Amino acid sequence: MIEVWKAIGMDMEGGKVEFLWSSKEIDARADEYWPLVLDIAQKFSVQRILSCSEIMGRSENMKNPLVLLKYSIHALNVLARDYCDIIKRKNKPVILSHNMLPGPQQGQEKMSKSDPLSCIFMEDEEADVNVKIKKAYCPPKITEGNPCLDYIKQLVLPWFNEFTVERSADNGGNKTFKSFEELVADYEIGELHPADLKPALSKSLNKILEPVRLHFRTNKEAKELLKKVKAYKITK
């Protein structure tokens, strides 16, 4: 993950970014961490604790005043704030929950790394992205629950500030959309067809991912790390 962030331009120099490993933080402050864990366990039901199991083992929510986490662990965020109410702690953490990208298949509320076809990986090759988008759920004129439109809204338009569809003159000719609302308007009435939208989406996503691919091809350490990760996926 750190190598991916480097590839997309995160400035690691000058102490601007610091990575903390939860295991080391717990070991370094075990006398603070474990009493906190036990106190939280005593103050909430088993069912409430289990609802937060996805992120068990991390205590940063209780220490940081501002936390950015994915929305799928909203239950933990609420528990952290409720715990502060119980112990009468005034400076409760402020939670910023970012949106989750849906999986490309119908009904997938989020991408799943356990199923390669339901997730677009940062290290995916161009052909991989093309196949996944080609097979993605994208019914004509339907915008609700359409993952391809979500990718354009959340990834492509913020990245490029536009989305260009290349098509033949018989199908309306090339068109560049400057806003998501403009794109949706065309899609809902059938002016923009999935057969034209999908290739344009694949092209845009591949442009975004190309610097990452280049980094893992040309950086010796990153290349070796990716090789180890892929080998781990196969054996596990």
Image (cartoon, rainbow, N blue to C red):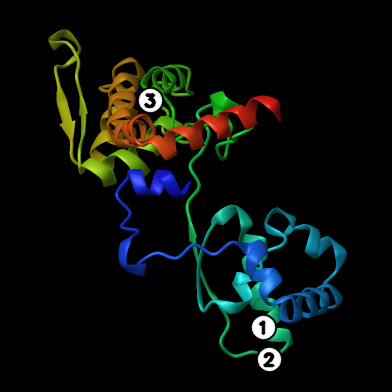
Measured in 3D between alpha carbons, the distance from the residue under mark 3 to the one under mark 1, in whole angstroms, is: 47 Å
Which residue appears at 39% of the width and 49% of the height? 5
As helix, strand or loop, the secondary structure at mark 2 comes to loop
Q: Amino acid at mark 2?
A: Lys
Foreground: 136 or 213? 213
Give the amino acid at mark 3.
Lys
Q: Position of residue 158 (x, y in %)?
A: 28, 46
Measured in 3D between alpha carbons, the distance from the residue under mark 2 to the one under mark 1, in whole angstroms, is 6 Å
Q: Which one is earlier in the sequence, the residue at label 3 or at label 2?
A: 2
Q: Which mark is residue 141?
A: 3
| Residue at (69, 26) in percent of width and height | 235
| Location of residue 177 by image quarter | top left
Q: Establish if 222 lies above or below 132.
A: below
**Is tag 3's residue or tag 1's residue first in the polypeptide sequence?**
1
Q: 196 above or below 150?
A: above
Q: Nearer the viewer, residue 60 or 235?
A: 235
- Disc 3 is placed on an element classified as loop
Locate residue 22, reporting x and y percent.
63, 63
Is residue 159 visible to us here?
Answer: yes
Tell us which disc is closer to us: 3 or 1. Answer: 1
Check residue 88 in the rendering and tell me which mark sits there, or answer none: 2
Above or below: residue 100 compared with residue 175:
below
Left or right, 5 with respect to 33, comes to left
Q: Residues within 10 Å of mark 1 (few under 14, many from 20)?
A: some
Label 2: how many Cα within 10 Å (few below 14, some 14–19, many 20+): few
- Whether pointer 2 and pointer 1 mark residues with C-beta atoms closer than 8 Å, the reply is yes
> Mark 3 or 2, which is nearer the eye?
2
The correct choice, above or below, for 63 with respect to 104 in the image is below
Residue picked out by circle 1: 84
